[in-house]
Amino acid sequence: MAVHDEASCHSPRRVEGIPVQRKKAIELQQAWGDRPCAHPAFSREYDLGERTGNYCCTQCGASVTFREKAEISAARGAGPKRPRTG
């Protein structure tokens, strides 16, 4: 699984689908350190207001591709989430 220093997340309590910025992700990665993470939730990754196409772990700040996110979710038995409507 790829982990990029440029990841972008906001806080450990953010939920998937809420845009977040790189600066907060870097702070989160520094605070988390090298501890292992189960990546319990992901958020869309943004840099300077633009979608990067990746996702980041809301707990440790790790940046993952859509495919990596799907593999992590499948491994823990979580199915894909439906898009929000409304």
Image (cartoon, rainbow, N blue to C red):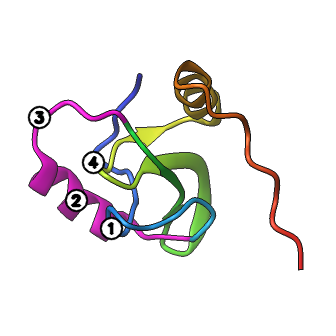
Q: Please tell me which of labels 3 and 1 falls first in the chain.
A: 1
Q: Do the residues labelled 3 and 1 touch (CB within 8 Å)?
A: no
**In whole angstroms, how far apart are the C-alphas of marks 3 and 4?**
9 Å
**Label 2 CA crowd tier, 10 Å (few <14, some 14–19, many 20+):** many
> What is the C-alpha distance between the residues marked 1 and 2?
7 Å
Which comes before the other along the chain, label 4 or label 1? 1
User: What kind of residue is marked 3?
Assistant: Asp
Which residue is drawn at the image coordinates 34% and 33% (left, top)?
Answer: 38
- Magenta segment, which residues? 19-38
Residue carrying label 2 = 28
Whether residues under marks 2 and 4 lie with C-beta atoms below 8 angstroms apart, the answer is yes
Q: Residues within 10 Å of mark 4 (few under 14, many from 20)?
A: many
Mark 3 Cα shell of 10 Å, populated few (<14), some (14-19), many (≥20): few
Membership of 53 in magenta stretch: no
Q: Do the residues labelled 1 and 2 touch (CB within 8 Å)?
A: yes
Q: Is mark 1 on a helix, strand or loop?
A: loop
Q: What element carries label 2?
A: helix
Q: Disc 3 marks which residue?
A: 34
Q: Which residue is the site of mark 4?
A: 60
Helix, strand or loop at mark 3: loop
